Amino acid sequence: MDTSLGSVEGFMDKVKRFKEEGNPLDLSSKEDLGIAIMNLISLEEHFQFSFEKTRDDKFLELLKSVREIRKDMLAKVVTDPKGEVWCISKHMLAASMRLSEVGTKALGQGKDAEAKEYFDKAYSIWNLFWGMNLGLLDIKDTSANISDTEAAALPLQSETKTVSPDPKKPATRKSDLFGRLGTVIGDIMNCCRE
């Protein structure tokens, strides 16, 4: 596998060092800021759609103002935007927010299993966003070049329940590599919170 960490073992060593060194960040404040950025991105989208529906230029002015605030806030989290990291970070937050919203709607419709799947995916993307922006994960680390053997070496969260055609035999599925990386990063963030 050719990644900036060299291997899954390299990734796990980096995780271990991160835990041992302690986390100098106030993650609870950073996470609140991440949620705020998600909502600012959402506001940008709503202002754009409102402009399209009304053709009222005030929505474009509001969009510009909110975009400037979002850029300032994103810069507080994305401190080393190499390559496409800035844009990838923005889209990860937007995707996480949208998946959460779709999950919430599914939950409201009584589709609990479907909602949980959306929430799990949103949380994996959220964790990958933080892994990338805390320096635990480079984009190359999630490449398809990771072999099945190396992927199996990543810790796996408890199996996730899925809907089974036979209610007497609940089906389970294991997380994919994307989910595993998100889970490992989520575990690190949980242990680093004050």
Image (cartoon, rainbow, N blue to C red):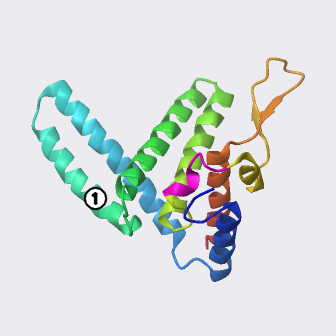
Q: To which residue does mark 1 refer?
A: 71
At horizontal 71% and vertical 65% (from top left) the residue drawn is: 9
Residue closest to the eye, 113 or 142: 142
At horizontal 65% and vertical 65% (from top left) the residue drawn is: 11
154 relative to 104, above or below? below
Task: Residue 5 in the image: state x and y as whole percent.
Answer: 59, 66
- Numbered range of the magenta stretch: 139-146
At horizontal 69% and vertical 48% (from top left) the residue drawn is: 147
Residue closest to the eye, 91 or 143: 143
At horizontal 9% and vertical 37% (from top left) the residue drawn is: 57
14 relative to 186, above or below? below
Mark 1 residue type = Lys
Task: Residue 49 in the image: state x and y as whole percent.
Answer: 25, 31
183 relative to 193, above or below? above
Q: Residue furthest front?
A: 2
9 to the left or right of 65: right
Q: Quadrant of the N terminus?
A: bottom right
Numbered disc 1: secondary structure? helix
Q: Residue furthest right?
A: 168
- Decide whether residue 141 is among the magenta residues: yes
- Decide whether residue 150 is among the magenta residues: no
| Residue 191: quarter of image | bottom right
Q: Quadrant of the C terminus?
A: bottom right
